[in-house]
Image (tube, helix red, strand yellow):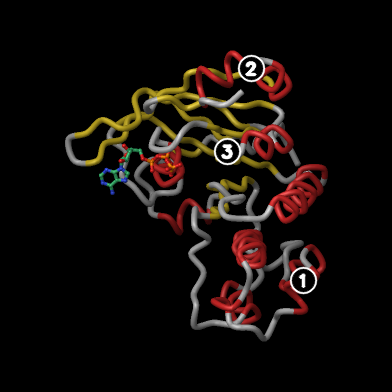
Protein backbone atom coordinates (compact mmCIF):
# COMPACT_ATOMS: atom_id res chain seq x y z
CA UNK A 1 0.00 0.00 0.00
CA UNK A 2 1.47 3.36 -0.92
CA UNK A 3 2.08 6.09 1.59
CA UNK A 4 -0.59 8.16 -0.14
CA UNK A 5 -3.35 6.76 2.04
CA UNK A 6 -2.84 9.32 4.74
CA UNK A 7 -5.44 10.88 6.97
CA UNK A 8 -4.63 14.49 7.72
CA UNK A 9 -6.66 16.49 10.22
CA UNK A 10 -5.94 20.19 10.61
CA UNK A 11 -7.35 22.77 13.02
CA UNK A 12 -10.63 20.90 13.39
CA UNK A 13 -13.31 22.72 15.37
CA UNK A 14 -16.58 20.96 16.18
CA UNK A 15 -19.55 22.25 18.14
CA UNK A 16 -22.66 20.83 19.75
CA UNK A 17 -25.00 23.79 19.46
CA UNK A 18 -22.96 26.62 20.98
CA UNK A 19 -20.58 24.35 22.88
CA UNK A 20 -17.10 24.23 21.42
CA UNK A 21 -16.23 20.52 21.76
CA UNK A 22 -13.19 19.98 19.50
CA UNK A 23 -10.77 22.88 19.54
CA UNK A 24 -8.13 23.06 16.85
CA UNK A 25 -7.47 19.32 16.58
CA UNK A 26 -4.59 18.43 14.23
CA UNK A 27 -2.93 15.08 13.62
CA UNK A 28 -1.90 12.63 10.89
CA UNK A 29 -2.35 8.91 10.45
CA UNK A 30 -0.24 7.12 7.87
CA UNK A 31 1.11 3.58 7.72
CA UNK A 32 1.87 3.46 11.45
CA UNK A 33 -1.24 2.54 13.49
CA UNK A 34 -2.37 5.38 15.75
CA UNK A 35 -4.53 5.14 18.84
CA UNK A 36 -6.35 7.95 20.61
CA UNK A 37 -7.03 7.72 24.32
CA UNK A 38 -8.76 10.03 26.77
CA UNK A 39 -11.17 10.03 29.64
CA UNK A 40 -14.95 9.95 29.18
CA UNK A 41 -16.49 12.98 27.56
CA UNK A 42 -13.24 14.42 26.19
CA UNK A 43 -14.47 14.46 22.59
CA UNK A 44 -13.19 11.22 21.06
CA UNK A 45 -16.52 10.02 19.67
CA UNK A 46 -17.30 13.52 18.45
CA UNK A 47 -14.01 13.40 16.54
CA UNK A 48 -14.81 10.00 15.02
CA UNK A 49 -18.23 11.22 13.91
CA UNK A 50 -16.81 14.41 12.44
CA UNK A 51 -14.18 12.40 10.51
CA UNK A 52 -16.79 10.18 8.85
CA UNK A 53 -19.37 12.87 8.13
CA UNK A 54 -21.83 11.96 10.89
CA UNK A 55 -21.42 15.25 12.73
CA UNK A 56 -20.88 18.60 11.02
CA UNK A 57 -17.55 20.28 11.63
CA UNK A 58 -17.41 24.00 12.27
CA UNK A 59 -13.99 24.63 10.73
CA UNK A 60 -10.74 23.01 9.72
CA UNK A 61 -9.78 20.33 7.29
CA UNK A 62 -9.92 16.53 7.05
CA UNK A 63 -8.18 15.09 4.02
CA UNK A 64 -7.62 11.52 2.94
CA UNK A 65 -5.43 10.75 -0.05
CA UNK A 66 -5.24 14.50 -0.45
CA UNK A 67 -9.00 14.81 -0.91
CA UNK A 68 -10.98 17.16 1.34
CA UNK A 69 -13.66 15.24 3.22
CA UNK A 70 -14.89 17.82 5.68
CA UNK A 71 -18.60 18.30 5.10
CA UNK A 72 -18.83 15.20 2.88
CA UNK A 73 -21.72 12.79 3.44
CA UNK A 74 -20.83 9.50 5.17
CA UNK A 75 -21.20 7.41 1.98
CA UNK A 76 -18.68 9.70 0.26
CA UNK A 77 -16.26 9.23 3.14
CA UNK A 78 -16.65 5.44 2.85
CA UNK A 79 -16.20 5.75 -0.92
CA UNK A 80 -12.97 7.68 -0.33
CA UNK A 81 -11.58 4.67 1.56
CA UNK A 82 -12.42 5.24 5.21
CA UNK A 83 -14.19 2.37 7.01
CA UNK A 84 -15.95 3.15 10.26
CA UNK A 85 -16.60 0.87 13.22
CA UNK A 86 -18.90 2.91 15.46
CA UNK A 87 -19.00 2.92 19.22
CA UNK A 88 -21.65 0.45 20.40
CA UNK A 89 -21.32 -1.61 17.16
CA UNK A 90 -24.65 -0.39 15.71
CA UNK A 91 -25.68 -3.75 14.34
CA UNK A 92 -29.19 -4.36 13.04
CA UNK A 93 -30.93 -6.74 15.46
CA UNK A 94 -33.44 -8.04 12.89
CA UNK A 95 -30.74 -9.43 10.57
CA UNK A 96 -28.66 -12.57 10.92
CA UNK A 97 -24.87 -12.45 10.78
CA UNK A 98 -24.88 -13.58 7.17
CA UNK A 99 -27.62 -11.15 6.13
CA UNK A 100 -25.58 -8.30 7.61
CA UNK A 101 -22.52 -9.18 5.61
CA UNK A 102 -24.48 -9.95 2.44
CA UNK A 103 -26.26 -6.63 2.70
CA UNK A 104 -22.97 -4.73 2.59
CA UNK A 105 -21.58 -7.21 0.04
CA UNK A 106 -18.11 -7.12 -1.46
CA UNK A 107 -16.71 -4.39 -3.66
CA UNK A 108 -15.54 -5.53 -7.09
CA UNK A 109 -11.84 -6.37 -6.99
CA UNK A 110 -11.63 -6.10 -3.20
CA UNK A 111 -9.80 -8.69 -1.15
CA UNK A 112 -12.67 -8.41 1.32
CA UNK A 113 -15.46 -10.79 0.43
CA UNK A 114 -17.98 -12.28 2.85
CA UNK A 115 -15.90 -15.49 2.83
CA UNK A 116 -12.73 -13.52 3.60
CA UNK A 117 -14.50 -12.00 6.61
CA UNK A 118 -15.43 -15.53 7.73
CA UNK A 119 -11.78 -16.58 7.30
CA UNK A 120 -10.70 -13.69 9.52
CA UNK A 121 -13.42 -14.44 12.09
CA UNK A 122 -14.24 -18.19 11.93
CA UNK A 123 -16.61 -17.70 14.85
CA UNK A 124 -18.83 -15.53 12.64
CA UNK A 125 -19.06 -18.35 10.09
CA UNK A 126 -20.27 -20.66 12.87
CA UNK A 127 -22.83 -18.03 13.85
CA UNK A 128 -23.87 -17.08 10.32
CA UNK A 129 -27.55 -17.98 10.76
CA UNK A 130 -27.87 -16.44 14.22
CA UNK A 131 -29.78 -13.17 14.68
CA UNK A 132 -27.36 -10.35 15.41
CA UNK A 133 -29.07 -9.47 18.70
CA UNK A 134 -28.27 -13.00 19.94
CA UNK A 135 -24.55 -12.67 19.28
CA UNK A 136 -22.19 -12.06 22.20
CA UNK A 137 -20.56 -8.64 22.53
CA UNK A 138 -17.35 -9.98 21.01
CA UNK A 139 -19.20 -11.55 18.09
CA UNK A 140 -21.09 -8.32 17.48
CA UNK A 141 -17.78 -6.47 17.42
CA UNK A 142 -16.40 -8.95 14.88
CA UNK A 143 -19.51 -8.35 12.79
CA UNK A 144 -19.09 -4.58 13.02
CA UNK A 145 -15.45 -4.89 11.93
CA UNK A 146 -16.34 -7.36 9.16
CA UNK A 147 -19.01 -4.99 7.89
CA UNK A 148 -16.50 -2.14 7.78
CA UNK A 149 -13.89 -4.31 6.02
CA UNK A 150 -16.36 -5.17 3.27
CA UNK A 151 -16.30 -1.52 2.26
CA UNK A 152 -12.62 -2.23 1.39
CA UNK A 153 -11.23 0.57 3.56
CA UNK A 154 -7.73 1.88 3.16
CA UNK A 155 -8.10 3.30 6.67
CA UNK A 156 -10.20 1.80 9.48
CA UNK A 157 -11.53 4.28 12.05
CA UNK A 158 -12.67 2.38 15.14
CA UNK A 159 -14.44 3.87 18.13
CA UNK A 160 -13.92 1.94 21.39
CA UNK A 161 -14.10 -1.59 20.00
CA UNK A 162 -13.13 -3.10 23.37
CA UNK A 163 -16.06 -1.54 25.23
CA UNK A 164 -17.94 -4.12 27.26
CA UNK A 165 -15.78 -7.05 26.15
CA UNK A 166 -14.17 -9.64 28.42
CA UNK A 167 -10.35 -9.39 28.67
CA UNK A 168 -9.85 -12.65 26.75
CA UNK A 169 -12.01 -11.34 23.89
CA UNK A 170 -10.10 -8.04 23.91
CA UNK A 171 -6.86 -10.04 23.62
CA UNK A 172 -8.22 -11.86 20.54
CA UNK A 173 -9.24 -8.55 19.04
CA UNK A 174 -5.72 -7.21 19.56
CA UNK A 175 -4.39 -10.24 17.65
CA UNK A 176 -6.81 -9.69 14.78
CA UNK A 177 -6.04 -5.99 14.50
CA UNK A 178 -2.31 -6.69 14.54
CA UNK A 179 -2.78 -9.20 11.73
CA UNK A 180 -4.65 -6.59 9.72
CA UNK A 181 -1.97 -3.98 10.40
CA UNK A 182 0.75 -6.44 9.36
CA UNK A 183 -1.13 -6.94 6.09
CA UNK A 184 -1.00 -3.19 5.48
CA UNK A 185 -4.37 -2.15 6.84
CA UNK A 186 -4.21 1.38 8.19
CA UNK A 187 -5.87 1.92 11.53
CA UNK A 188 -6.97 4.85 13.66
CA UNK A 189 -8.19 3.39 16.93
CA UNK A 190 -10.09 5.35 19.58
CA UNK A 191 -9.94 3.56 22.94
CA UNK A 192 -10.42 4.03 26.66
CA UNK A 193 -8.51 0.82 27.34
CA UNK A 194 -4.90 1.96 27.54
CA UNK A 195 -3.56 -1.61 27.28
CA UNK A 196 -5.50 -2.24 24.07
CA UNK A 197 -4.64 1.17 22.66
CA UNK A 198 -0.92 0.69 23.21
CA UNK A 199 -0.89 -2.91 21.96
CA UNK A 200 -2.40 -1.86 18.65
CA UNK A 201 -1.20 1.73 18.27
CA UNK A 202 2.45 2.51 17.78
CA UNK A 203 1.72 6.16 18.36
CA UNK A 204 -0.81 7.43 20.87
CA UNK A 205 -2.68 10.72 20.88
CA UNK A 206 -4.21 11.89 24.14
CA UNK A 207 -7.43 13.89 23.95
CA UNK A 208 -8.10 16.24 26.85
CA UNK A 209 -11.07 18.62 26.74
CA UNK A 210 -11.33 18.57 22.96
CA UNK A 211 -7.63 19.16 22.31
CA UNK A 212 -4.69 16.87 21.56
CA UNK A 213 -2.74 17.15 24.79
CA UNK A 214 0.00 14.69 23.82
CA UNK A 215 1.25 12.80 20.79
CA UNK A 216 3.85 10.18 21.69
CA UNK A 217 5.08 6.65 21.14
CA UNK A 218 2.91 3.97 22.74
CA UNK A 219 5.93 2.62 24.66
CA UNK A 220 6.70 6.09 25.94
CA UNK A 221 3.20 6.53 27.40
CA UNK A 222 3.23 3.01 28.86
CA UNK A 223 6.51 3.74 30.63
CA UNK A 224 5.33 7.11 32.01
CA UNK A 225 2.94 6.60 34.93
CA UNK A 226 2.95 10.31 35.68
CA UNK A 227 1.56 11.11 32.23
CA UNK A 228 -0.95 8.26 32.44
CA UNK A 229 -2.17 9.68 35.71
CA UNK A 230 -2.21 13.25 34.45
CA UNK A 231 -4.08 12.50 31.23
CA UNK A 232 -6.09 9.41 32.03
CA UNK A 233 -6.30 9.17 35.81
CA UNK A 234 -4.68 5.73 35.81
CA UNK A 235 -1.31 4.56 36.97
N1 LIG B 1 -25.53 14.93 21.13
C1 LIG B 1 -24.87 15.72 21.97
N2 LIG B 1 -25.38 16.95 22.30
C2 LIG B 1 -24.70 17.77 23.12
N3 LIG B 1 -23.50 17.49 23.68
C3 LIG B 1 -22.97 16.29 23.40
C4 LIG B 1 -23.60 15.35 22.54
N4 LIG B 1 -22.81 14.25 22.43
C5 LIG B 1 -21.74 14.50 23.20
N5 LIG B 1 -21.83 15.71 23.78
C6 LIG B 1 -20.83 16.32 24.67
O1 LIG B 1 -19.62 16.46 23.95
C7 LIG B 1 -18.51 16.16 24.79
C8 LIG B 1 -17.66 15.12 24.14
O2 LIG B 1 -18.39 13.88 24.09
P1 LIG B 1 -17.82 12.60 23.34
O3 LIG B 1 -18.91 11.56 23.35
O4 LIG B 1 -17.25 12.99 22.05
O5 LIG B 1 -16.66 12.17 24.32
P2 LIG B 1 -15.83 10.83 24.38
O6 LIG B 1 -14.44 11.23 24.66
O7 LIG B 1 -16.08 9.99 23.18
O8 LIG B 1 -16.44 10.11 25.64
P3 LIG B 1 -16.92 8.60 25.80
O9 LIG B 1 -15.69 7.81 25.94
O10 LIG B 1 -17.74 8.65 27.05
O11 LIG B 1 -17.73 8.24 24.59
C9 LIG B 1 -19.09 15.78 26.15
O12 LIG B 1 -19.04 16.89 26.98
C10 LIG B 1 -20.51 15.40 25.84
O13 LIG B 1 -21.34 15.68 26.95
In the picture, the disc for residue 65 is 3
Q: Which mark is residue 225?
A: 2
Quadrant of the drawing holding the N terminus: top right
Return the mark for residue 123: 1
Q: Residues within 10 Å of mark 1 (few under 14, many from 20)?
A: few
Residue at image position (64%, 38%) is: 5
Q: Nearer the viewer, mark 2 or mark 1?
A: 2
Quadrant of the rendering where the C terminus is positioned: top right
Q: Nearer the viewer, residue 167 or 59?
A: 167
Residue 155 position by quadrant: top right
- Cβ of disc 3 within 8 Å of ligand 1? no
Vertical relation: 130 (above or below) 207:
below
Q: Is residue 137 above or below residue 102?
A: above
Residue drawn at (54%, 53%) of the image: 84
Q: Residue furthest front?
A: 235
Q: Residue at (53%, 18%) from the top-left corner?
A: 214
Residue 74 in percent (x, y) is at 43, 55
Query: Is 145 positioned to the left or the right of 110 in the image?
Result: left
Amino acid sequence: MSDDHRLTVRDLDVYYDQVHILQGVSFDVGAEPVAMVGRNGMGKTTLAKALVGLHPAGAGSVTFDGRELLGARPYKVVGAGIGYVPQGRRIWPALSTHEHLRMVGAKPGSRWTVDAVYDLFPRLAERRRVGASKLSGGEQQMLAIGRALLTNPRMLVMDEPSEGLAPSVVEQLVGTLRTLVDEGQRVFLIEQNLGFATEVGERVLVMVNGRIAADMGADELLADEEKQNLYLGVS
